[in-house]
Image: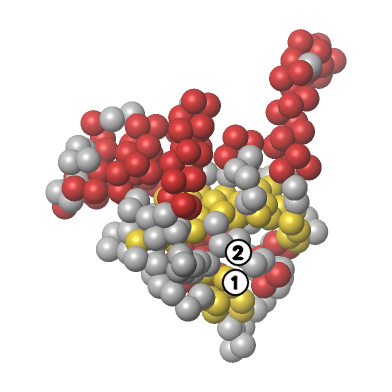
Amino acid sequence: MTLNRKPYLLQASYRPDAELDFDSYPFCIPAVRELESIKFHSDVTFFVGENGAGKSTVLEALAIALSYGAEGGTKNVQFKTTESTSSLHSALRLVRGPWQPRDGYFLRAETFFNVATYMDEVGYLGGYDNKSLHSRSHGESFMALLIHKLRGRGLYLMDEPEAALSPNRQLAALSAIHQLVKNESQFIIATHSPILLSYPGAKIIQFDGYGVSEINFEDTEHYSVTRDFLNNYPRRLQQLLSDENEA
C-alpha cells in the first residue's frame, strides 16, 4: 500500500486577529477578498487571470507565509533587492496536511536572475548540476531547476515559469512537473501558458473582478484565445493591424 502524504497545503485563510482593510491594497483586490474560498489540489493548482488580478500577489503571500524569501529560491535563500512585498502574508493562516514536504522551492520568474546571482556568490551550485545559472540561457536555467534541483516529495510554488521557455521547453517542463507529481509533489502555479494549463486533472482557479472561481481548461481565455488565433490568424491579424484600429 502506497502512503499518500499529499496535499501538504490544503487552504489559506485569514487569521482571526488579522486587521483587514478591504479598501486598501492588496485587500481591495476581489480575488484577495475571496482568498479563503481557494482549496488547493493535492497535485497541481493553477492561478489564471488578467494582469493585475492578484495571482502573483497571492502566490507571493503564500510563499512568504511558508518562510520563503520574497524573491524566490529555497527557504535558505533570504535576501531582498527591493521592498515591494504586500502585507498580505502577515494576515494569513495556512491550513496544512498532516505530512511535511521534504523539499520546496519558490520560483519567481521576474527575480530569478537575482537568485542565480546569489547562487554564484555563495558558491552553492550542487543542486543545479554544478554549473552557474548565468552560464546558461534563461530557459536552460529554468529547466536545470526543474530537472536537477527539485528532488520530489516537495511543495513547489511557481510564478509564471513559462516566461523563459519556448513552446518545446514548456512541453518538457510539463513532463518534468508530471514526474515530480508522481514523486509525491504538490504544485501551485500562476501562469498564462495554455500548454501548462493542460495538465490533466489540475485545478484551475480563475482570478477576476468578481473574485475567484474554478474553471475548466477549455473554458479559460488562454485556451479559447490561443485556439481562435491559431485557427484564424490571417483574419485576426487583418483585424488587429487594420488602419481602422490604428486610428
Check whether the beta carbons of the residues at disc 2 and disc 1 lie within 8 A of each other. Answer: yes
**Residue 157 appears in the figure:** no
Taking the image as shown, residue 200 lies to the left or right of residue 152, namely right
The residue that appears at 81% across and 13% down in the rendered structure is 235
Circle 1 — which element? Answer: strand
Q: Is residue 149 above or below residue 196?
A: below
Q: Which mark is residue 40?
A: 2
Q: Is residue 12 above or below residue 227?
A: below
- The picture places residue 68, in percent across and down from the top left corner, at 38, 64
Q: Is residue 243 above or below residue 73?
A: above
Q: Which mark is residue 11?
A: 1
Residue 184 falls in image quadrant: bottom left
The residue that appears at 33% across and 59% down in the rendered structure is 74
Residue 57 falls in image quadrant: bottom right
The disc, 2 or 1, on the residue closer to the chain's N-terminal end is 1
- Quadrant in which the C terminus is drawn: top right
Q: Residues within 10 Å of mark 2 (few under 14, many from 20)?
A: many
The residue that appears at 45% across and 57% down in the rendered structure is 185
In this view, the residue in front, 222 or 26, is 222
Residue furthest right as drawn? 244
**Residue 3 appears in the figure:** yes
The residue that appears at 80% across and 59% down in the rendered structure is 210
Circle 2 — which element? Answer: loop
Q: Amino acid at mark 1?
A: Gln
Q: CA distance from mark 2 to mark 1?
A: 6 Å
In this view, the residue in front, 36 or 61, is 36
- The picture places residue 183, in percent across and down from the top left corner, at 42, 54
Taking the image as shown, residue 230 lies to the left or right of residue 152, namely right
Q: Amino acid at mark 2?
A: Phe
Q: Residues within 10 Å of mark 1 (few under 14, many from 20)?
A: some
